[in-house]
Amino acid sequence: MHLATTAPLISYYDYIIIGGGTAGCPLAATLSQTSSVLLLERGGSPFNNPNTTHLSAFGSALSDLSPKSPSQRFVSEDGVINARARVLGGGSSINAGFYSRAGSEYIENAGWDAKLVNESYRWVERMVAFHPPLRQWQSAIRNSLVEIGIRPYNGYTLDHLYGTKVGGTIFDRYGRRHSSADLLSYANPLGLTVYLHAPVERILFATQGRRPRANGVMYTDANGMSHWAYLRRGAKNEVIVCSGSLGSPQLLMLSGLGPKEHLEAHNISVVLDKPLVGQGMSDNPMNAVFIPSPRPVEVSLIQVVGITHNGSYIEGASGTLFTCFQIGQLSTVPPKQRTEEALNRAIEAMRFLPRRAFLGGFILEKIMNPLSRGYLELRSTNPNDNPSVTFNYFKDNGDLEKCVEGVKIIERLIQARSFSSFRYNHLPIRTLLNMTANSPVNLLPKHVNASRSLLQFCKDTVMTIWHYHGGCQVDKVVDRDYKVIGVDGLRVIDGSTFDHSPGTNPQATVMMLGRYMGVKMLSERL
C-alpha cells in the first residue's frame, strides 16, 4: 500500500479498479495474477487503526466523525442515520462481522455459475471466515428461536437455510477482524499497485467512435494534486467501479453517465443519458427491542440468526459496546432536526447515562427483500461529499406487514423459557416496546400508541443495518456481465448492482462476487 501522494502524475495499467472495498479487494487480487492492476481507495488502511482491527472496538469507527474516520456518516432523506465505508476493505472493515452465504435461489436468479460461486466462496472463506464462540446471551437467542418454532436447527453453517443457525464471523478467536483487505494477500505483488487516500474525481472517456469507451480516471491525493491513470492499449483492458451503493452511482453521474437533466443541472457534460443510474435504491429496514437484563451479558455481535418464512430475519446483539453504538449511530431524526449539532448532542448525552442503562441487549428483525424503492441524486460535484439518497422505508405496505410479523416473533422470543434468565419478569412486552419507542435512539416525535400499534412502532423506530443496495442494477444500468450498458471498457461490480440484499448479511456474497468476476474476466482475457 502507498499513499497517493507518492503516485506518478501519469501511469498506465491493464485494469483500474475504483474502490478497495468488499468487492474491489478480491477482484484486484484475482486480476493481478496475469495483469497489471491499479486499485484506488479513497480511505486509509484498516490495519493500523485500533477502531477497525478488533471486535472490542466495534462501533468506535462508526462514531468517529473526523475527516479521516474509516466511516463516513450520512443521513438519508427519510431521516435515518447511516454510514458508508471510507477505508481499505470497505464495509467489511467496519461492520459487525456476520458471515453467511446467499441462498441457492438467489444464485440461480442472478444467473451465476453455481460451481464457480462455490469455489469463489471457499477462496474467500479460507482467509476470512471463522466459527464464533457462543456464550450465554447468543446461546439463549439460539435456544429461544428453536423453542418458538423457528426450525429446524441447522447448527453452525455458512449456508442460507430456513430455520435457526449459527453463522460465521470475520473475527477470529482472538477477536481480530479479517476484512476483504486481507484477501489482497492472495495478490501477485508484481501485478498490483494500491494507492490510499486517492478519491477518484471522474472516469475518462474516449468519445470518437459510436460508443463512448472508458480509457482512464483522474484522481487526487491528500495534497489536492491531480493524477491521471490510463488503460494500456488492448480491447480487454477495463475500468471497474467498486465504490458501493452510494459511491458507484455517484461516480457514474460525476463522470457524465446518468439522467441528462440532473447532470446538466450540476453543469456536468453528458457522456450518455442513463436515467436509471441512481434509481432503485433500497435499504433493509431494521427494528429492534432493547431487553434490560437482570444479569451481566457478554459483548456479542450477530452470531445467531432465525431465517423465517414470515419475511424477516431475527438476530441479537448484547453488551455495553453494542448498546452505546446503537444509541449513538442508529438514530432517526425528523427532517427539520437533521443537523450535525443535534445529532452530536444526542450522542454525547448517551455517554453520561448510568452503566445499568446498558446492561442487556437488542433483539432485532430485518426485513427480507423490501419492496420499497428510492433514488440517489448528487448534492454537489465533489466526490467526497455524500450524495442525497432516499430509501422510502415502508412506502410499500408489504414491508410494513413483514415488520409487524417480525416484531411479533421478537415478542414470543422474549417470553420463551430459554430466554427467562435475561429478562425481568415484572416487565411486560408493552413496557419493553415503550422503553424502546421512547428511548433516545431517535429524535422523532413520539406517539403514545407506539407500543399498542406495532405498525406505529415499526415506523417510529425504523433503523438501518447498513445493507443498502441498488443504484446500478443488473439489466438496468449494467448487463449480466456487469458491463455498463451503452459504454465500452467499463464495469460496475459491487452491491449497487443488486435488486435485493443476498442472504442474511451481504458481505460474504459481495466478496465472492469480486473473486467470481475476477476469475471470469481472466478467463475472457485468455
Image: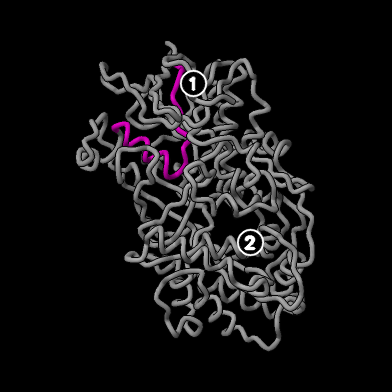
User: Depth-wise, is mark 1 or mark 2 nearer the camera?
Assistant: 2
Q: Which residue is mark 1?
A: 15
Residue in the picture at 24% in, 31% down: 270
Q: Is residue 55 left or right of residue 38?
A: right
Three-letter amino acid code of the residue under disc 1: Tyr
Q: Is residue 7 above or below residue 299?
A: above
Q: Is residue 68 placed above or below 196 in the rendered structure?
A: below
Front-most of residues 480 and 245: 245
**Can residue 413 be seen by looking at this rendering?**
no
**90 in the magenta segment:** no
Question: Looking at the picture, how far across and down is residue 514, in whole percent?
Answer: 56, 34
| Mark 2: amino acid | Phe
Label 1 sits on a secondary structure element that is strand
Specify the farthest residue to the top. Answer: 233
Q: Residue furthest bottom?
A: 426
Residue 255 in magenta?
yes
Camera sees residue 300: yes
Instruction: Please state the horizontal and vertical placement of residue 492, each as a whole percent of the image.
Output: 44, 34
Numbered range of the magenta stretch: 236-256
Q: Earlier in the sequence, mark 1 or mark 2?
A: 1
Of residue 251 and residue 81, the one placed in the foreground of this image is: 81
Q: Secondary structure at mark 2?
A: helix
Q: Is residue 12 above or below residue 31?
A: above
Residue under the point 26% across and 41% down: 259
Q: Position of residue 446 (x, y in %)?
A: 42, 78
Per the image, the residue denoted by label 2 is: 322
Q: Residue at x 39, y 28 (%)?
A: 224
